[in-house]
Amino acid sequence: MGDASGVLRPAAAADPSSLSYLTMLGNCPLIAVVLAGAIAQFIKSLSVEIDRIKKENDNMQIELRHLKGEDINSLQPKELIMIEEALDNGLTNVHEKLMDDWEWLARNV
């Protein structure tokens, strides 16, 4: 188990390939407890992150429906103005891209 330096080492197994992490953790219960706590905390933080992303996704789905003109009866005038501005900006960008394409086509034909 230990050597002259005082470092704990797992007992030598008959077959070195049979020494698994679980076997080593079984020999070091304190490490197993600490590791289990760290894993539990990691899983909890992942769960919180998953919930946050699900909520963000739900909000984006609602916003997309609004941009498509669905479910807008419940919106306040300020929200409608923001959607109108976003749609106007999008339309302007599409128009500019279309004009660029027409100009490119006229030069290259």
Image (cartoon, grey):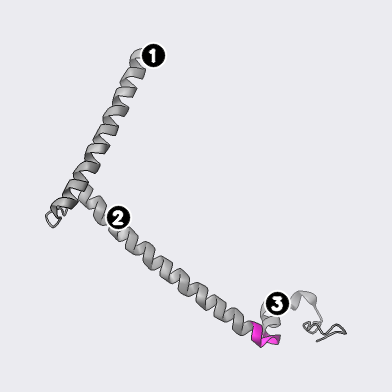
The main secondary structure of the magenta stretch is helix
**What residue is disc 3 on?**
20
Residue at 19%, 52% (x, y): give it. 79
State which region is magenta. Answer: 26-31
- Residue 14: give its label: none
Secondary structure under tag 1 reads helix
Q: Quadrant of the C terminus?
A: top left
- 29 and 5: which is toward the camera: 5
Q: Earlier in the sequence, mark 3 or mark 1?
A: 3
Q: Which kind of residue does numbered mark 2 sit on?
A: Met
Q: Is residue 108 left or right of residue 88?
A: right
**What residue is disc 2 on?**
60
Q: Is residue 6 left or right of residue 66?
A: right
Residue at 74%, 77% (x, y): give it. 18
Q: Tell whether position 58 is magenta.
A: no
Camera-near label (3 vs 1) is 1
- Crowdedness of circle 1 by 10 Å Cα count: few (<14), some, many (20+)? few
**What residue is disc 1 on?**
108
Q: Quadrant of the N terminus?
A: bottom right
The residue at the far front in this view is 78
- Crowdedness of circle 3 by 10 Å Cα count: few (<14), some, many (20+)? few
Marks counted in the figure total 3
Spatial distance from mark 1 to mark 2, Cα to Cα? 41 Å
